[in-house]
Amino acid sequence: MTYCFASRILTRRIAGSVLSLAFLCVPALPSFSAPVRPQPARTSSASDTETRFVDDLLHKMTLEEKIGQMSQIALNQPQDVSPDQRILNGQVGSFLFVTDPNEINRLQHIAVERSRLHIPLIFGFDVIHGFRTIYPVPLALAASWDPAMVEHVQSMAAKEASAVGVNWTFAPMVDIARDPRWGRIMEGAGEDPFLGSKMAAAQVRGFQGETLGSPNHIMACVKHFAGYGAAEGGRDYDSSDISDEQLWNVYLPPFEAAVRAGSGSLMPAYMDLNGVPAAGNKFLLQDVLRDKWKFNGFVVSDWDAVLNLTTHGFASGPEDAAARAVNAGVDMEMTSHVYRDHLADAVKDGLVKQSTIDEAVRRILTAKYRLGLFAHPYVDPSHAAAELVTPEQRQASRLAAERTAVLLRNEDHLLPLSKSLQSIAVVGPLADSKPDIMGSWSLAGHPADAVTVLEGIRKRFGSSATVLSTKGVEIARGQPSIFDSQFPSPQPTLETDAERKAEFAHAIDLIKQSQVAVLVLGEAQNMSGERASRSTLTLPGEQEQLLEAAVATRKPVVLVLLNARPLNITWASQHVPAILDAWYPGTEGGNAIADLLFGDANPGGKLPVTWPRSVGQVPIFYAHNLTQVPDAHNTLYWDASSAPLYPFGYGLSYTSFKLDNLKASAPSVKSGSSFTVSIDVQNTGSMAGDEVVQLYTHQRYGSASRPVRELKGFRRITLKPGEKQTVTLTVDTHDLGFWSPQTHHWSIEPGPFDLWVGASSAATEHTTFTVLPQ
Ligand code: BGC
């Protein structure tokens, strides 16, 4: 008997390779309820038992078997030898992109029962913002300014993924991004190292739980180490040229936070950092990661990145690439079998020490041990289905979507909309698109599970209001996405200009017939993410024209943005009365947006990025240094304002807040200790709502110029109408330290500081304090 099942179809073009597979048919399997290997106890730190277990195993392994553990293959890669045979030969330690529990068990069975040393496989997958239930994209999660919620979201994602047998996610992505042209800005927490560090740690805790191997959790893999977000020109994969000062103070802190939170693995980036490709970069992988941060997890390369050391013009050929990667500290190679084919030769030729191989394998086996894979290699397929898209998952996804939305504009309190509306037009290419509400990296998500904005609004009104809808315009990428065959956005269907004009006119007609128009515009999900950089930030296609024509009808217009990067909405910011940035909110997006539009939820998210007026302003970020014309900072271009459209940390609410009575617990603080700052926050409106209290500091002078403001604390609170709360934030002087380009080390420099607390990076409540020597 044979079970046939559809595997996820994957076609990716990276470094010239095309990988695809449609269906797999596998023989019927015995049941795998009972583990068959001896069961060492699960633990999170190196116990004697663990060390002995790993050492014993290592001792028995041939060089080829060791290299096998260091090799990860995608099941859908074309293989000269079948994956099954590779497992039998001890030539593979891990798979990625296998998400079917039966297939996971089948492969695991070969490894555990039939390979010589019975070493279990580890299964990795990109669980970036959900597995089957999709949550808001990571940039949106950062907009919640709510690390506890973000931790919960990733633990829910881990629960689904672990239920099908995935042990390991390639997340969190913690690359600081200050250039919205870069498509992968969606995968990180935005521009700020402090916010980014909090989000990094929260995600690691969420994925992994208390300790590596916690039930219903998976191993994290912090990526892409380091500086990927600084790609020149915002072009994905392009070089990053980053000064030491920026590297230590801006780009590295979120990685350090993830490592300190216990991330079990780490992935180096694709690009070269200051000339040295990250996968062969000893400074990053040895000096910083191992020597300074004492990282004890294992390092996996990015897709084909070991082979690409030759493509980069760095390694002379595959053997050299294998040697350079492993000597730099890459323990496992993803997909490009250079280790498998050339590492043994590199050892024989004296390019790589046997002890380096042993160290890499030890780390991988230790992770497998800690994850409990030797004890419990199999997953229970009957349990898997019951864990996917459960009401609990949907509820968490909806709540997350509500907490991540950012209200950018709300003239004359247009929002929330009245629940007794009789007619409403829901218009735009994204109004009823299921994949697009999910966002990129939703590879295990099913569009059929998703609720669109149109569906959310229709569900809310039932038959009590007329809800009219059409696209108005269609949008598509200029060139295909590497994920199109796997997770496509709807393609345009209108073929002629006449058809397109008629559709546009139809949309305007529907708006004229309705009391209110909700325009759902932005980017299709495949317009951001990997290999999705842009040279402009305009609304793609004719969406701007549609918006302007909608406003010209004089009907009240609400713009709902679906996006994962700031877009050019400068015109809209002056002419469209209400703008709600919903990001890519995920499976329950449509319901959450309906809750927000009609006031069952109140937006409280804040921007994790500075929002530019035009692409010419990028890179743009709030934590810039002082110039010699500090008061003229908004006039640094003669042809336009150099001020952002919306500052970092900005976001409105349906209610209003008053922040005053700022107090520092002491006028000075000794280096190495901490002090507290309090402020009174009052909800002065008539609706319950959330405010994010944000604390910024500025070191007035020192061994180097420091940014005008830097985020050093925040808290999101909920207040009922009229309610007042004193919010106390702790400033740890450790967070005031920086890596000085003069002294070349990290220090807290005594001297005077400014401090602001408020509801965005433009906070005005101000005080000062002095840091005293220890
Ligand atoms: C991406 C990684 C991802 C990997 C596996 C690469 O192209 O850069 O972020 O984890 O593919 O999907």
Image (cartoon, grey):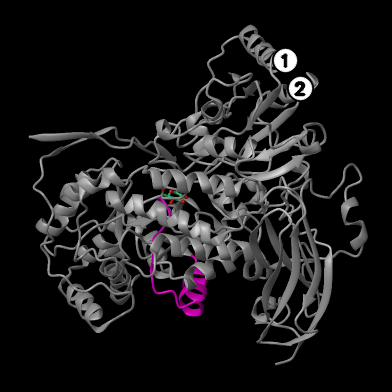
Disc 1 from disc 2: Cα separation: 7 Å
Q: In this figure, which residue is indicated by the disc labeled 1?
A: 512
**Residue 616: image x %, image y %?**
77, 43
496 shown above or below 84: above
- In the picture, the disc for residue 555 is 2
**The N terminus - image quarter:** top left
**Residue 434: image x %, image y %?**
48, 30
Magenta-tinted stretch: 281-304
**The C terminus - image quarter:** bottom right
Q: Quadrant of residue 744?
A: bottom right
648 vs 728, nearest the viewer: 728
The residue sitting at 66% across, 65% down in the picture is: 714
42 shown above or below 674: above
428 vs 185, nearest the viewer: 428
Which of marks 2 and 1 precedes in the sequence?
1
453 shown above or below 77: above
Are the two marked residues, 1 and 2, in contact with CB atoms closer than 8 angstroms? yes
Identify the element where label 1 is drawn.
helix
Please name the amino acid that badge 2 sits on: Lys
Q: Quadrant of residue 565?
A: top right
The residue sitting at 35% across, 68% down in the picture is: 212
- In the picture, the disc for residue 482 is none
Please name the amino acid that badge 1 sits on: Lys
Residue furthest to the bottom: 774
